[in-house]
Amino acid sequence: LLQSSSVSPMSHASAASQSQTPFDPIRDRPEPALIEFQARAALAEDVGEGDLTASLLPVDRLARAELITRESAVLCGVPWFEAIFRVLDPKIRIQWDAEDGEPITPGQRLCVLDGPVRALLTGERTAMNYLQTLSGTATLTRRYAEAVAGLPVRVLDTRKTLPGLRLQQKYAV
């Protein structure tokens, strides 16, 4: 959605998107309790009563995983990615090489995860769904913002989001 700077802001656009302040992944992050609630809901939907494949592996086995991007994008969704693994097992450690809002390139390592293999396998799809969806939103938004750079308009978010992902997608914008 484009808006001329000479027109008053639309009432349903979020205050954060109307701000002229650049995105800050810490300041603009939703409350941790809300992110955790959303992560728990996503896991309940995705995993349900348990991950049968992960349950075949030894309980005490540890693993390391690297997350490598295949495409150029704007990284987004780190708080939800982390929350998925924190909910599953707080022993999982994630070391990020990039942060929300940063451009990423094909072949770039985004993070390294260390911890119990069962929790890593159980959470990987749900966590990746967050990163892929929100990074896609952030990447397209960045393209639109760059296309109108220098014009008297701004790119704003609206209420047209995926059900259950409104807060996350507004964060991505």
Image: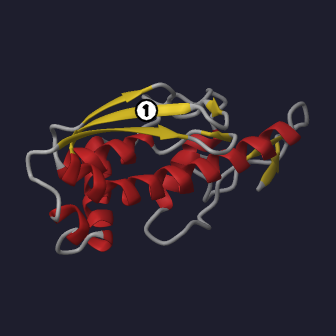
Residue 81, relative to residue 28: is it above or below?
below
Q: Colour scheme in the image? A: secondary structure
Which element is circle 1 on? strand
At 33% from the left and 42% from the top, the residue drawn is 82
Residue 81, relative to residue 161: is it above or below?
above
Task: Using a 10 Å C-alpha cutoff, classify the residue at mark 1 as few (fewer than 14 neighbours), some (14 to 19) or many (20 or more).
Answer: some
At 9% from the left and 52% from the top, the residue drawn is 59
Q: In the picture provided, is 10 more to the left or to the right than 69? A: right
Q: Which residue is mark 1?
A: 111
What count of labels does the image hold?
1
Disc 1 marks which amino acid?
Cys
Snapshot quadrant of residue 139: top right
* Residue 21 pos. (x, y %): 62, 27
* Residue 24 pos. (x, y %): 52, 28
Q: Quadrant of the N terminus?
A: bottom right
Snapshot quadrant of residue 126: bottom left
Q: In the picture provided, is 119 more to the left or to the right than 11? A: left
At 67% from the left and 30% from the top, the residue drawn is 20
Residue nearest the viewer, comparing 49 with 116? 116
Residue nearest the viewer, comparing 15 with 160? 160
Residue at the right extreme?
151
Q: In the picture provided, is 98 more to the left or to the right than 71? A: left
At 54% from the left and 69% from the top, the residue drawn is 162
* Residue 81 pos. (x, y %): 38, 46
